[in-house]
Amino acid sequence: MPWPVYVLAGFYAFGRINELVFAFYSDALDRLEGKKLRIEIRKSERIVLLGIGYIETIVQFGLVHLAAQALSPHRAYSHPLRDAFDATYFSVMTITTTGFGDFAPDSLLPRLVTMYEAVIGIVFLALALGSYLSFTVKPDDTGVGK
């Protein structure tokens, strides 16, 4: 694919990642502050949405990594990301903090993207754990909202 396509897709993906993180973070804060929820959904649906958002974030970061590689004037990664599969694989290894080391960022932009992804992975984990624990606190809870 031509590099401008990767760059455009990467910019879109970066915006979508931030939108997802902001939405889940705002929802968690609203629940902590006891505010009325904007959308009434069951607890199980809330956790499913968080899981889907996590998977979407992994794929979106794959696109961002391809864009970072296209925008880097020098070698971006220790081994070039050949396709979307390589980029998604690297994204999974980064967001889960597994990091096998077969791919590593070698220039500034890919390093910044990788650091951001690692932080977002921890934020999603905290939000998921917080959501789950908030549902197990009250035995008289009806299952809607909170």
Image: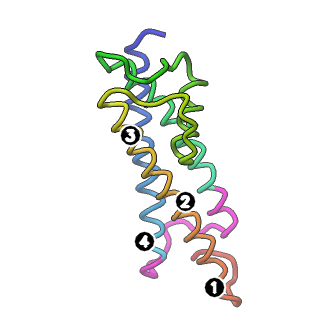
Q: Residue at x 29, y 16 (%)?
A: 73
Q: Please tell me which of labels 1 and 4 falls first in the chain.
A: 4
CA–CA distance between discs 2 and 1?
A: 19 Å
Residue for badge 1: 137
Q: Is residue 76 above or below residue 14?
A: above
Q: Nearer the viewer, mark 1 or mark 4?
A: 1
CA–CA distance between discs 4 and 2?
A: 15 Å
Q: Nearer the viewer, mark 2 or mark 1?
A: 2
CA–CA distance between discs 2 and 3?
A: 20 Å
Left or right: 47 in relation to 1: right
Range of residues picked out in magenta: 32-48
- At label 1, the amino acid type is Val
- At label 4, the amino acid type is Leu
Q: Dot 2 lies on which element?
A: helix
Q: Is residue 17 above or below residue 72?
A: below
Task: Rate crowding at label 2 as few (under 14), some (14 to 19) or many (20 or more) other CA atoms within 10 Å.
Answer: some
Residue for badge 3: 15
Q: Residue at x 51, y 28 (%)?
A: 103
CA–CA distance between discs 1 and 3?
A: 34 Å
Q: Please tell me which of labels 1 and 3 falls first in the chain.
A: 3
Q: Nearer the viewer, mark 1 or mark 3?
A: 1
Label annotation for residue 29:
4
**Cβ atoms under marks 1 and 3 closer than 8 Å:** no
